[in-house]
Image: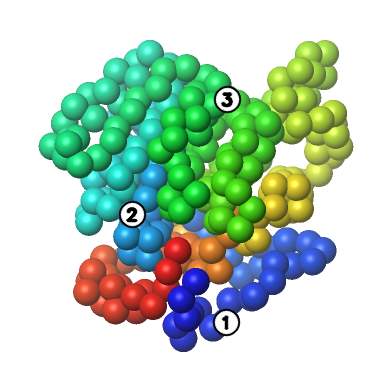
Amino acid sequence: MGETIEMFEELPVQHPPHSISQSGLGAVWTQHKAQLIAKYIYLFTIITRHGAYIDGFAGPKRKELQDSWSAELVINTEPRRLREIFLCDIDPAKISALNSLVAQQGDQAERHYQVLSGDFNECIVQILGSGRIKDKTATFCLIDQFSLQCHWKTLEAIAGHKPEGSKKIEIFYFLGTSWLHRTLKGLTKNTDRADQWWGNGDWNELVTDSGEKIAIRLAERFRDELGYKYVKPYPIYHSEGGTGKVMFHMIHASDHPAAHELMARAHRNVTQAPELAEQLELELSTLTY
């Protein structure tokens, strides 16, 4: 790591020893989710100057809503520093949309695009085994699942892919806390799905917890079991201005000490005018990945 510049001096050098809280976290509005991801990737690559992007559930969620497709925004983010792009989905219609998106790109000679059709829990084995995600490859993985689609073993594989001493693959993990209780209660007679998602049978304890407590508990597992140094859950609200119920939480897990400041900066700028690339280059120039 290079010397951290002044704007990051307030960041903790250690993660919290006992609990992860959401105090001080700003609201992230549903209609700005994709823009937030794209903004973070932009800042991420300002530091890394390269990168790999894995999207486990990459198809468009609401194609009729402009600027709401994360994969599209990330791929088109300038400067186009991402070099390895893996897009996965199990829905044939969404795979068709992803293939069309890739076909529109004019930089396929410089970038590696791969669309994978199937269960992300199986596709990730192919991605990690491809040899393209190397020890020093700055890699970001978006898991924009609906409910329980991503298995805990998949998270273990992602977190453990790089050797000790390397920075882990960063993860944005969406947790559907608004409908999670209903989903889990519906699986009391068929627990395999929930067991695979949570990694064990302890998910039964979540049924009586609040959505916020579940998000914090999951974030603590990312830290304590998956070994991420910096983890925070971000609430995503139903309406503008951070109003209405919390629909889901975004768990951001990273080994980079600047990650949370970048995330906070991305959030602040989602609804503001974009910053000049020259200004960002100057401010972030002393950070290394």
Q: Give the residue pinned by disc 3.
A: 121
How far is mark 2 from mark 1, CA to CA? 26 Å
Query: As shown in the figure, which amino acid type bears the numbered disc 1?
Result: Glu
Q: Is residue 265 above or below residue 159?
A: below
| Disc number lying in front (3 or 2) | 2
User: In the figure, is residue 16 to the left or right of 111?
Assistant: right
**Could you tell me if residue 66 is visible in this image?**
no
Q: Who's the residue at 36% across and 74% down the image?
A: 284
Between 181 and 58, which is closer to the camera in this rendering? 58
Give the total of numbered labels: 3
Name the amino acid, label 3: Asn
Where in the figure is residue 12, as x and y percent of width and height? 64, 75
SS state under label 2: loop
**Position of 263 relative to 171 (above/below):** below
Could you tell whether 98 is left or right of 79 in the image?
right
Alpha carbon of mark 1 to alpha carbon of mark 3: how far? 37 Å
Secondary structure under tag 1 reads loop
Q: What mark, if any, has residue 10 been given in the picture?
A: 1
Judge by depth and name the residue closer to the eye, 97 or 228.
228
Q: Which residue lies furthest to the left in this view?
A: 106
Residue at 70% x, 47% y is 226
**For residue 243, side relative to residue 48 (left or right):** right
Taking depth in this image into account, of 279 and 176 the one nearest to the observer is 279
Mark nearest the camera among 1 and 3 is 3
Determine whether the residue tagged by mark 3 lies in a helix, strand or loop: helix
Q: Which mark is residue 50?
A: 2
Above or below: residue 219 compared with residue 187: below
Sequence-wise, the earlier of marks 2 and 1 is: 1
